[in-house]
Amino acid sequence: QVQLVESGGGLVQAGGSLRLSCAASGTFSSIPFMGWYRQAPGNEREFVASISSSGSTNYADSVKGRFTISRDNAKNTVDLLMNSLKPGDTAVYYCNAVLIRPPTNYWGQGTRVTVSS
């Protein structure tokens, strides 16, 4: 079992920055993959970024060059630094953790990010 708690959302003007953080707790030895997804009103949840325990990263095309994901394996945390924010980035952001055995997805409760124009 993995519990995920996000923090760091809020209201920011277009062009500004925010850092989201997610802390994982529970009974696990390691978390192979952690990441962030987001869901805007009326839209489906979409992938934003992910990072493996070895540090390999993936980003959605819409955030490449603006967002940076990082993690601290010792603290079981994952951060998302969001720069050059746009109104289109407005959404609830969810932290995600993936365990392999058995294959299981865990989600945080979400943190809201609002970017004003």
Image (cartoon, grey):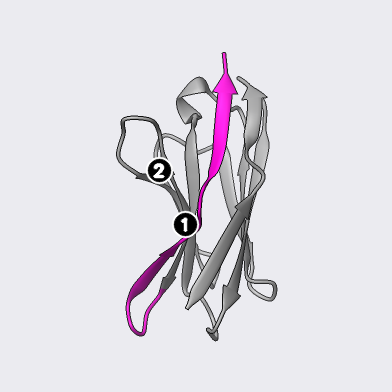
Q: Is residue 27 left or right of residue 19?
A: left
The kind of secondary structure element at disc 1 is strand
Q: Position of residue 46 (x, y in %)?
A: 35, 44
Q: Position of residue 74 (x, y in %)?
A: 69, 76
**Quick check: 59 above or below 51?**
above
Magenta residue span: 99-117
**Could you classify mark 1 by the number of other residues whose Cα lies within 10 Å: few (under 14), some (14-19), or many (20 or more)?**
many
- The quadrant of the picture occupied by the C terminus is top right
**Quick check: 35 above or below 88?**
below
The residue drawn where x is 64% and y is 28% is 11
Q: Quadrant of residue 4?
A: bottom right
**Residue 114 counted in the magenta span:** yes
**Could you classify mark 2 by the number of other residues whose Cα lies within 10 Å: few (under 14), some (14-19), or many (20 or more)?**
few
The residue drawn where x is 67% and y is 32% is 17
Q: Position of residue 107 (x, y in %)?
A: 45, 60
The residue drawn where x is 54% and y is 69% is 3
The amino acid type found where label 1 is placed reads Ser
Q: Quadrant of residue 70?
A: bottom right
Front one among 1 and 61: 1
Whether residue 46 is visible here, answered yes or no, is: yes
The amino acid type found where label 2 is placed reads Ala
**Quick check: 36 above or below 107?**
above
Front one among 69 and 89: 89
**Residue 8 counted in the magenta span:** no
Give the residue number, with chain letter if any, for mark 1: 50
Q: Is residue 93 left or right of residue 73?
A: left
Give the residue number, with chain letter if any, for mark 2: 60
Residue at the top extreme of this rendering: 117
Whether residue 57 is visible here, answered yes or no, is: no
